[in-house]
Structures are given as C-alpha cells and as structure tokens.
Amino acid sequence: MSLGLVLALAAAGVIGLVLGGLGGGGSILTVPILVYLAGVDAKPAIAMSLIVVGVTAAVALIPHARAGRVAWRVGALFGSAGMVGAYLGGRVAAFIPANVLLVAFGIMTIATAWAMLRSRSTPSAEDGPAKRRPVIKILLEGVAVGLVTGLVGAGGGFLVVPALVLLGGLSMPTAIGTSLLVIAMKSGAAFAGYLSTTTVDWPLTAAITALAVLGSFAGAKLAGRIDPKRLRQAFAWFVVVIGVGMILGQLL
C-alpha cells in the first residue's frame, strides 16, 4: 500500500466530519484526496466522490433527523429538482476533458468558499408551515445546483444550505440537516449519469466511504457544540487554498 493511499484513507474521516458538521464540503475534500493522494484519474475520482458523499450524507442525516433538524417536504422538493440537474450534468461530463473538469472544480471550490464566507451575514429564518416558500425558485435553484454537482462533483451543501435558509425559510440548524437529504438524492442521480461512461474502483470507494461515515457521526455531534460561523469561515479559507492549488496545478 502506497503512502498516498494510506494518507487518502486517513483523510477519509475528515470528509465525514466536515459533511456531518457543516452539511456540505464533502466533495471539496474527496476529489482532491482521490486525485492527488490516491492517484485516481479525474473523472473516476468525481464519480467515486459522488458515492462517498452520497452514502455519507444519507448516514449523517439520521442523527439530524432524530434531533428534528430535517424539513422533509422542502428537502424532497429541492432534492428532486437537483436530481434532474445532477443526472444531466453527469451525462454531459463524459464529453468534457478531464483537465477542464478539474479547473472547473477548482473554480467551484473558490465560489463555494465565497458562499461560505458570505453566509456569515445570512439572516436566520424560522421554520414552520406559515413561512411562504417560493416553490418555483426552489425548483430552479435545485436544478442549477444539481447540474453543477453532476458536472464537477462539487457545489453541493454550501450552496444548498444558504438556498434552504433564504428560499426554504429554514433556520440554519434545520438547513444543515435538510441539506444532507438533498446531497444524498442528487449525488445518487449524478453518479447514475457517470456510471455508463466511467469505471469505479469499488474496493477503494467502499473503504473511503466507510471511514467517512464514521467521521460523519462525530461531525453530527459537533454540529450543535461548535459555533458554525467560525467553523465555516476557517474551512472556507482552507477551501480557497485547495481550489487555487488545483487550478494552478492544471494550468502550469
């Protein structure tokens, strides 16, 4: 077993920790880990990341659901729209060169970091059926976010959470829990789009998924104990470094 593979497996727990604690960020870590540590090619890495993140999100959803932090109707609505965009994005990605996808991924991570930093000023909202929710806007944004996820395997939770707060009328804790439902749904659809044209290393995918799932339980426990604003800001700057590094690595 190579050193890179050992490091990739060691880093897998961090994927779950971030996903379970913040409701997003899993793909931002998974794709670079698979490409630069495990030596997986870009397109299979994106496809594998969708499995890792989708399964981890589904498992991380359980403790959030038990704590009452999931708005099922809003999540199903946003997630269903996201599945359509994600499947289309996964099919289109087969016709795009791998280096272009990695550059797009880097740009997406920087955009996601910006959304995380900007979310510190996002107003909180109250949950409840009395809140009027713009269904058309939720569906359109769901399709758009899903399309990005299908293309580059990123742009999930940290774009979904602000949308759920602003359009879905959810509080931040509920938006984080609900985003896991959305991520699981559209990751599955995006992977279906990739499956017909991409080969997956199933043993490696299973190992990283299992370790990420374990990390997600710790992340879910930390979600209610750590100031989410500070955690998001710190992670956002880390994401900027990853995104810039990936872009420079493909262009230089």
Image (cartoon, rainbow, N blue to C red):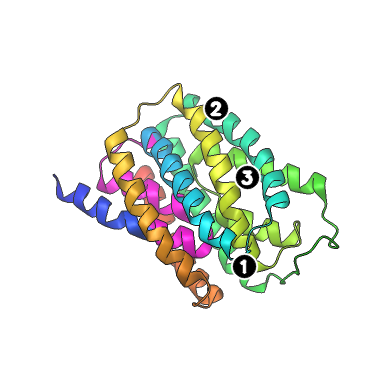
- Identify the residue at horizontal 64%, vertical 40% (top origin): 82
Does residue 170 appear to the left or right of 55 in the view shown? right
**Residue 7 visible, this orientation:** yes
**Residue 241 visible, this orientation:** no
Instruction: Determine the CA span between mark 2 and mark 3.
Output: 15 Å
Q: Position of residue 132 (x, y in %)?
A: 86, 58
Mark 2 surroundings within 10 Å by alpha-carbon count, few (fewer than 14), some (14 through 19), many (20 or more) = some
Instruction: Determine the CA span between mark 1 and mark 3.
Output: 20 Å
- Identify the residue at horizontal 15%, vertical 51% (top origin): 3
Query: Disc 3 residue type?
Result: Val
Label 2 secondary element: helix
* Lower position in the chain sequence, tag 2 or tag 3: 2
Check residue 173 in the rendering and tell me which mark sits there, or answer none. Answer: 1
Q: Position of residue 154 (x, y in %)?
A: 50, 47
Mark 3 surroundings within 10 Å by alpha-carbon count, few (fewer than 14), some (14 through 19), many (20 or more) = many
Residue labelled with disc 3: 145
Query: Disc 2 residue type?
Result: Val
Residue labelled with disc 2: 92
Query: Disc 1 residue type?
Result: Pro
Q: Position of residue 87 (x, y in %)?
A: 58, 31
Secondary structure mainly formed by the magenta segment: helix
Q: On screen, 227 above or below 141?
A: below
The range drawn in magenta is 15-42
Does residue 79 appear to the left or right of 53 in the view shown? right
CB under 8 Å between callouts 2 and 1? no
**Nearest to the observer: residue 156 or residue 246:** 156
- Identify the residue at horizontal 82%, vertical 60% (top origin): 129
Label 1 secondary element: helix
Q: Position of residue 49 (x, y in %)?
A: 41, 43
- Residue 187 covered by magenta stretch: no
Q: Quadrant of the N terminus?
A: top left
Q: Nearer the viewer, mark 1 or mark 3?
A: 1
